[in-house]
Image (spheres, rainbow, N blue to C red):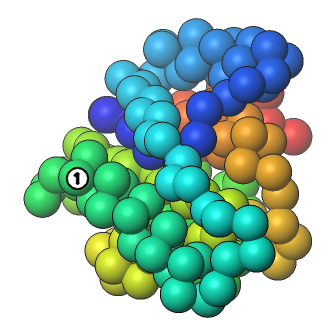
Amino acid sequence: MNITIIAIGKLKEKYWQDAVKEYAKRLGAYCRLNIVELKESLLAANPSPADEEAVKNAEGEQILSKISKGDYVITLEIKGKGLSSEQLADKIETLGIDGHSSIVFVIGGSLGLSKAVSERADFKLSFSAMTFPHQMMRVILLEQIYRSFKIIRHETYHK
C-alpha cells in the first residue's frame, strides 16, 4: 500500500523532524510512505477575508496538483468524522481490500483547506474539534497510521 501525506509547510523544529523520521522508519515495514511538503502561501498582515480565501485557494491548487485520479483522498478537517484508532485501522484495511492501493492524507495550511480540496476528499477525518499545530498533527497522523497497521496485523503495540 502507498500512503502519501501532503502537508502545507515544512517542519522547522528538529524534534518534529526526528519524530517524523522515526514513524517513517517504522512504517517502512507496512507501506511505502511519501511525505510531500508544499510551500505556505504568504499572507499579508491584517488580511481581509478575500486575502485569506486567496491563500487557501493557492495552497489548494498546490495540493490538488499532487493528487492523482486514482488516489483515495482523506482530508484532515475539524468538521470531518471522528474515528477511534480501531475504526481508522478498519478503514485502511477495508480500503486495501477494496483495491485502493494509494491513500493520500491531506493536512492544510494555517487557514484550513480550500473548498476544492475539501470537495475532492473521499473521506473527511477529524482528530478533534480542537485546533493543533500543523507540525504536531503530522506526527499524530503518522503515529495513528502506524498504530493502524499494528492493529490490522494483530501485533503488539496498540492498547
The answer to whether residue 48 is visible is yes
* Residue displayed at 33% across by 53% down: 62
In this view, 113 is above or below 74: below
Q: Quadrant of residue 57?
A: bottom left
Is residue 5 or residue 46 the one in the foreground? 46
Q: Position of residue 108 (x, y in %)?
A: 56, 59
Q: Quadrant of residue 117?
A: bottom left
Q: Position of residue 82 (x, y in %)?
A: 69, 74
Q: Is residue 67 left or right of residue 122?
A: left
Q: Residue furthest bottom?
A: 49
In this view, 43 is above or below 35: below
* Residue displayed at 81% across by 51% down: 133
- Crowd class of label 1 (few under 14; some 14 to 19; many from 20; radius 10 Å): few
Q: Residue furthest left?
A: 69
Q: Position of residue 14 (x, y in %)?
A: 80, 14
Q: Position of residue 8 (x, y in %)?
A: 53, 47
In this view, 59 is above or below 144: below
The residue under label 1 is: 65
- Quick one: quadrant of the N terminus? top left
The answer to whether residue 90 is visible is no
* Residue displayed at 45% across by 41% down: 38
Badge 1 amino acid: Ser
- Quick one: quadrant of the C terminus? top right
Asked which secondary structure carries label 1, the reply is helix
Is residue 92 or residue 17 the one in the foreground? 17
* Residue displayed at 48% across by 14% down: 29
Q: Is residue 38 left or right of residue 13?
A: left
Badge count: 1
